[in-house]
Amino acid sequence: MNPGRRLAAKGLAAGLALPATSLVGAQPPGHDAAIRWPALSLLDGSAWTPPRATDGRPHAVVAVIWSTTCPFCLRHNAHIDKLHRRAAGRSLSVVTAALDRDPDAVTTYLSRHGYGFPVVRESDRLRTLFTARRVIPFTGTVDRSGHVRDRVPGEMFEADVLGLLELAT
């Protein structure tokens, strides 16, 4: 099931009458065009660039905005780390951005929880590719053709996060 639909179904089960479209964040300008990745640097200062498959095609990308102080992000990040590890060798990459201003706090958080996914410093640049909303965690996906596919505000179920592996095909 599509993550947005699962979230909508969860809302309906809770007695909320939310159409699935209400779960999608504000659309950034040019949302129907191919994404243009800005310059992004990782916590260690190296540049992050969208990886390419051996055939030269871009990888699909799962991008997540989160914070070290968010309990929902902690659970969500455990799923994201599983996705990152399972995506190794496939045409899918994970990139995240922490909202925290202190890179040492982010590095400590990653180490304490054993997370291995990449974290970029420019959370605002990454967020503006997907939404104007300030909800965290926030997950955006880009398919292998380079177009934004999904925008999911809030925590996702593990099965939905791991289902994003289908983007690699």
Image: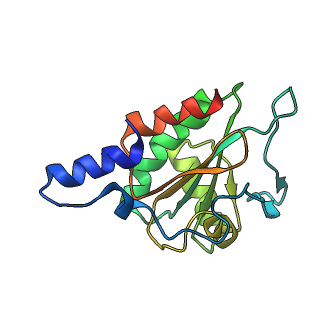
Q: Quadrant of the C terminus?
A: top right
Q: Position of residue 117 (x, y in %)?
A: 63, 44
The residue at 60%/37% (across/down) is 84
Query: Quick check: 63 left or right of 151?
Result: right
Q: Position of residue 139 (x, y in %)?
A: 51, 54
Q: Position of residue 151 (x, y in %)?
A: 50, 56
Tell me how many marks there are. 0
**Which is nearer the eye, 90 or 56?**
56
Query: Quick check: 51 left or right of 27?
Result: right
Q: Quadrant of residue 97?
A: bottom right
Q: Quadrant of the N terminus?
A: top left
**Which is nearer the eye, 45 or 66?**
66
Vertically, is 41 above or below 134?
A: above
The residue at 62%/75% (across/down) is 101
The residue at 69%/26% (across/down) is 90
Query: Quick check: 159 left or right of 125?
Result: left
Query: Quick check: 162 left or right of 72?
Result: right
Q: Position of residue 152 (x, y in %)?
A: 45, 55
Vertically, is 148 above or below 132?
A: above
Query: Extreme left residue here?
Result: 15
Query: Extreme front residue here?
Result: 32
**Which is nearer the eye, 11 or 64?**
11
Q: How is the image coloured?
A: rainbow
